[in-house]
Amino acid sequence: MLIRPEKARWHHGPPSSCAVASLIGVALNPDELVELLLGGAPVLAGSTEVISQRWDRKHGNEVLRIGNGQREQELRFAWEGGEWVVAGVAMFQVVQGGKPAWMWTVRHEKFHRIAGFTLPAKTIIRRPTPKGDETLTIRYVDQKPNPPALMASASGSGDHGGGEDGGDGPD
C-alpha cells in the first residue's frame, strides 16, 4: 500500500509502472526502478539501433543514443574509479515529423565505492509538465547494495512466503 497524505490519496495493489509513476513521476516497471536506484538505467526493450555516439567534453561523458523506431534513448557514461558507470539517461518519444519529444531525464551524481560497487550519492529525475519541468532529487543517506535479506533471497535460501506452489496460500 502506498499512502500519499500530501495529495489525500492512497494506492493499493501489486507493484506496477503506474505505482512507480505516482512516486517519481516516471512510469518505470519495478525492476527498472530498482536498477535506477542502484545507479543504473532502464534500457529500451526489444531491438534497437545506434543512432549516434559522441564524447561530451563539457560533462566528461560518453554519450550513446539508441532507438527502436518508437522511442529514442540517450545513455551517458562516466569514467569513475577505473570503471564506466551510468551517469544518466534521457528518454524521448518519436513523433510524426521526426523530432523526438523529451519524456524524462535521470542524472546520477557524486559517485562513491561501497562494498565493491560504484553507486551515486544523488539521483535527479526531471520530466516535463504543463507548467514547466518537475524535478525530484534523491539523496541516498545509507546505501547497502547487498543487504543480507536480499542475498538470502537471491541465493534461493530463506523464506519467500506463500504456499508450497509459491502462491500466497494453500490450494
Image (cartoon, rainbow, N blue to C red):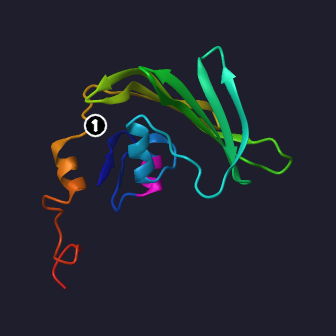
The answer to whether residue 106 of the structure is visible from this angle is no
Instruction: Judge from the rendering whether residue 158 lies leftward or rightward of residue 42; answer left or right.
Output: left
> What are the residue bounds of the magenta stretch?
16-21
Total numbered labels placed on residues in the image = 1
List x then y, in percent, for residue 78: 52, 24
List x then y, in percent, for residue 29: 46, 54
List x then y, in percent, for residue 7: 40, 43
Q: Is the residue marked by circle 1 packed among few (<14), some (14-19), or many (20+) residues within 10 Å?
A: some
* Dominant SS in magenta: helix
User: Which quadrant holds the C terminus?
Assistant: bottom left
List x then y, in percent, for residue 9: 37, 50
Q: What residue is rendered at 29% in x and 30% in y?
A: 116
Instruction: Judge from the rendering whether residue 149 lies leftward or rightward of residue 80; answer left or right.
Output: left
Say above or below: 110 vs 145.
above
Q: What residue is rendered at 59% in x and 50% in y?
A: 44
User: Which structural element holds mark 1?
Assistant: loop
Looking at this view, is 68 or 10 the one in front? Answer: 68
Q: Which residue reaches farthest top?
A: 58
Instruction: Judge from the rendering whether residue 148 lies leftward or rightward of residue 112; answer left or right.
Output: left
Q: Residue tagged by mark 1? A: 145
The answer to whether residue 50 of the structure is visible from this angle is yes
User: Which quadrant holds the N terminus?
Assistant: bottom left
Say above or below: 15 vs 103.
below
Q: Which residue reaches farthest left?
A: 158
Q: Which residue reaches farthest front?
A: 82
Image quadrant assignment for residue 5: top left
Image quadrant assignment for residue 12: bottom left
Instruction: Residue type at mark 1: give it.
Output: Pro
Looking at this view, is 102 or 13 the one in front? Answer: 102
Looking at this view, is 23 or 78 the one in front? Answer: 78
Q: What residue is rendered at 67% in x and 23% in y?
A: 55
